[in-house]
């Protein structure tokens, strides 16, 4: 067992952290033009295609190193929303193309998605189908050499800026788990429309919107994987997302923890730094414990992905630990800053950015359901086989 990154990874982490600090300051408001410029810069650094093989324009990195670079991105910039957008693009869209795409699909889409030229969005959630992903209503019907998609997606990260959508639709309503199919749909395809960006509590640097599909004709060779294989594509992408995406939060937590320690050493009350009071120092120890233990779980999950493990437990535990630690660390960092903590700043930003992390990639309740099921507990998944 080795807890050190190799020299190359350490150098890449330092470069990405410095890039994020210098080039990705927190924007006051979301601006699609500025977002695209930042995305291209991130593409030049290789950040948006880390886990894509070099043959298709990526850096060819495994999950541990991709997570290490995502952690560096989250550490360098306070704009966790931007890091979240990059991670959603990379782990929920590009990785499925790497794993399930045909050679032609990979050659056609991955280079421009890895370079920063194109941005991807992944849509499974619908207004009536959130945690219950098998309740999707978006349908795809084969008509000659096209599928015709009708329905809509909700809460789609990157939708307002996306060039390519990975969309889950029902091709066989009677087949349950085996009735979903993944499609690659380019922006500008007639019948695909994106709604107005949401106004969220946090992650302001990441645009989210609804996607509407009305008689949207998608060529049959834009199916990702096989017809009926959509749930398998989705599960594989979630293993990467629940692991590597959350590394951005580890970086953000480290940055806020470090500045909190500094603050506790400088702020004086009753004639001494507040860090000298046990109530404050123990709170900081608890913050450190949460961050370090969540970090170990995350890298354990990434290590498993690199070894080809495909269980739901390790990524689920990583997602649970990191998201809960981030919320609590944000609260603690605000508390230690006193009134200054409730002003705009990195503690309240972390808290606002951390709250959605308990919801996306499957809520924390759903992670517990999945883990319980893997332990042989809880209700069985509704699986209807052909
Ligand atoms: C910032 C953000 C970005 C997102 N990006 C994307 C994206 O890019 N693509 C995409 O497809 N989706 C995205 N989502 C949507 C996200 O995946 C869903 O919000 C999530 O799956 C939960 O669905 P829901 O919001 O409909 O909640 P619901 O499923 O309605 O759940 C409501 C509450 O009930 C609980 N609950 C529901 N069922 C159970 C159960 N069986 N056991 C225990 N508790 C249960 C949930 O835990 C939750 O607390 C995003 C969400 C957010 C917040």
Image: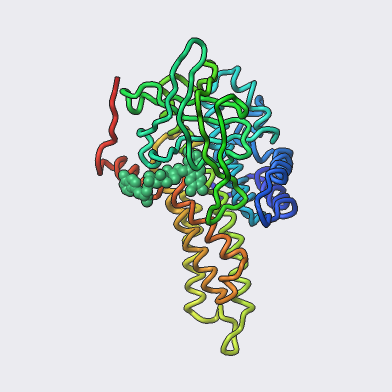
Colouring scheme applied when the structure was drawn: rainbow
Where residue 103 appears, x then y in whole percent? 59, 18
**As drawn, is 122 to the left or to the right of 69?**
left
**As drawn, is 259 to the left or to the right of 246?**
right
Where residue 184 appears, x then y in whole percent? 55, 25
* Residue that appears at 57% across and 71% down: 341
* Residue that appears at 44% across and 27% down: 169
Tell me if I can see residue 287 in this picture.
yes
The residue sitting at the bottom extreme is 271
* Residue that appears at 63% across and 38% down: 161
Rendered-image quadrant of the C terminus = top left
**As drawn, is 176 to the left or to the right of 139?**
left
Tell me if I can see residue 365 in this picture.
no
Where residue 359 appears, x then y in whole percent? 44, 49
User: Ligand 1 shows up in which quadrant of the image?
Assistant: top left
The residue sitting at the top extreme is 144
Front residue (pair 217, 338): 217
Where residue 218 appears, x then y in whole percent? 54, 20
* Residue that appears at 56% across and 71% down: 342
Q: Count up the numbered dots.
A: 0
């Amino acid at each position: 067992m080795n807890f050190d990154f190799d020299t190359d990874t350490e150098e890449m982490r330092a470069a990405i952290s410095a890039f994020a600090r210098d080039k990705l300051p927190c924007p006051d408001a979301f601006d699609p033009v500025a977002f695209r410029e930042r995305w291209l810069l991130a593409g030049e650094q290789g950040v948006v295609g880390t886990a894509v093989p070099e043959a298709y324009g990526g850096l060819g990195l495994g999950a541990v190193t991709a997570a290490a670079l995502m952690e560096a991105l989250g550490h360098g910039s306070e704009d966790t929303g931007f890091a979240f957008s990059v991670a959603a693009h990379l782990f929920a869209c590009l990785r499925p193309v790497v794993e399930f795409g045909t050679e032609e699909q990979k050659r056609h889409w991955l280079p421009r998605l890895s370079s920063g030229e194109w941005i991807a969005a992944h849509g499974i959630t619908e207004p009536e189908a959130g945690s219950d992903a098998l309740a999707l209503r978006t349908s795809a019907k084969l008509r000659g050499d096209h599928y015709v998609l009708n329905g809509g997606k909700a809460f789609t990260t990157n939708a307002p800026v996306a060039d390519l959508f990975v969309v889950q639709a029902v091709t066989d309503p009677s087949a349950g788990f085996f009735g979903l199919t993944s499609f690659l749909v380019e922006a500008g395809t007639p019948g695909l429309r994106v709604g107005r960006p949401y106004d969220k509590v946090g992650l302001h640097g990441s645009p989210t919107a609804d996607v509407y599909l009305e008689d949207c004709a998608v060529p049959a060779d834009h199916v990702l994987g096989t017809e009926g294989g959509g749930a398998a594509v989705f599960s594989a992408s979630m293993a990467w997302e629940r692991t590597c995406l959350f590394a951005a939060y580890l970086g953000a937590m480290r940055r806020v923890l470090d500045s909190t320690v500094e603050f506790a050493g400088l702020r004086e009350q009753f004639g001494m730094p507040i860090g000298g009071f046990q109530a404050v120092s123990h709170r900081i120890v608890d913050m450190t414990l949460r961050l370090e233990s969540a970090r170990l779980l995350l890298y354990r999950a990434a290590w498993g992905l690199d070894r080809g493990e495909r269980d739901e437990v390790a990524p689920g535990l990583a997602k649970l630990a990191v998201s809960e630690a981030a919320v609590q660390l944000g609260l603690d960092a605000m508390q230690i800053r006193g009134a200054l903590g409730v002003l705009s700043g990195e503690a309240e930003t972390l808290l606002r950015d951390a709250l959605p992390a308990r919801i996306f990639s499957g809520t924390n309740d759903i992670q517990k359901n999945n883990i319980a099921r893997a332990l042989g507990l809880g209700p069985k998944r509704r699986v209807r086989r052909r």
